[in-house]
Amino acid sequence: MDGAGRLARSQRPQADLKAAALGAVILLREYVSARLPRVRLPRRQTKPQHGRRPPRGDRAQVPGALAPMVEREAPPRIVAFVERYLPRRLGTIATVALLFGSVWLGIVKGGHAQDVSAALSDTRNALANAAGFRITAVAINGRKQLTQDEVLAVGGVSGRSSLLFLDAAAVRDRLKANPWIAEATVQKFFPNQLQIDIVERKAFALWQQDGRLSVIADDGAVLEQYVSRRFLTLPLVVGKGAESRARDFLALLARYPQVRAVTKAAVFVGERRWNLRTKDGLDIRLPEYDVGNALATLSQLDQEDKLFSRDIVAIDMRLADRLTVQLSEDAGKARDELFKDKKSKKKAGDA
């Protein structure tokens, strides 16, 4: 008994589901029957056979399964329920929505959304230009490094753009995304004038990293990867992190013009301290802290002893209490010979 009861309870949801599905089918059939116009077929003229009269009545004799659909009327309660809770023309609306959804899904899945958006934008701009909103006058103020065509290209303004549909805020954001432009203002003067005011960043130094040379601003922003001839006179900084620390160090180096004049490049070592490379190939290793005093010492030694003119290859100032000088190979040999001569003379004198 228990097994039979459990079996009956497990089959009960399936029976309820079947009953609900059957009810939905009947309801849909009744709705369609109520919406379809009644069709009355002309009565077929038949000759009486064997003295029998044709059937009476106005109903046409429709063969097969069409007779119930044509002549059957839905119960009033079902029709009232459908008309109350289902809006009219629901089928038409659902069909249109399905068509639009299919088109949109095909555009998105096929990767054509950008092309369709560009086509729609060109169409509306063409209509606006035909109506007299074509951009015929453009004023760009504040540009020095960028040309007018470059500014318009960065802002996304082309010959097909119309002033009516031009988004000034979007143009401004695109302009500020360019590393050369620090600030930008875009104004529209209807019906056909556009004004753009920009503030450009200034080229501050050249930065070398992993063999690549770039132009940077004073805040470390990379302005260009390619270096043209007009930037070759800028100071050179080398190493990882040098672009963000260059402004403070070069400002400190400018206080000592005698050292600054012979410096070819400033190398940032280990992201902690700086080395100077002079135009003659001299390598000056500066300390991590108290760099100002080290630069002052270099300037004083050059004034008094012509330090930068001597035959040396490196100056080590990393230790606070000493300064170490490394001679060149020729200078080292000359120094060794000098000491040998002094020793031999001393021995001869003692003898």
Image: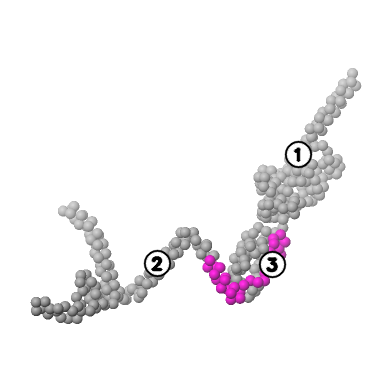
User: Where in the figure is residue 136, as x and y percent of width and height?
Assistant: 65, 72
| Residue found 25% across the figure and 65% down from its top | 22
Mark 1 highlights which residue? 316
Q: Quadrant of residue 276?
A: top right
Mark count: 3
N-term-proximal mark, 3 vs 2 = 2
Query: CA separation, marks 1 and 2?
Result: 79 Å
| Residue found 14% across the figure and 78% down from its top | 47
User: Where in the figure is residue 256, as x and y percent of width and height?
Assistant: 80, 49
Above or below, 249 relative to 314: below
Report the magenta residues as a range.
Answer: 119-148
**Residue type at numbered disc 3:** Ile
Above or below, 171 relative to 85: above
**Residue type at numbered disc 2:** Leu
Instruction: Report if residue 111 is visible in the image.
Output: yes
User: Where in the figure is residue 101, as x and y percent of width and height?
Assistant: 42, 65
Q: Tag 3: Cα neighbours inside 10 Å, few (<14), some, or many (≥20)? A: some
Mark 3 highlights which residue? 140
Label 1, secondary structure: give it.
strand
Mark 2 highlights which residue? 98
| Residue found 75% across the figure and 43% down from its top | 277
Query: CA separation, marks 3 and 1?
Result: 52 Å
Q: Is residue 137 magenta?
A: yes
Query: CA separation, marks 3 and 2?
Result: 49 Å
Name the mark nearer the viewer: 1 or 2: 2
Decide which of 158, 91 is in the foreground and name it: 158
- 53 with respect to 34 (left or right): left
Q: Tag 1: Cα neighbours inside 10 Å, few (<14), some, or many (≥20)? A: some
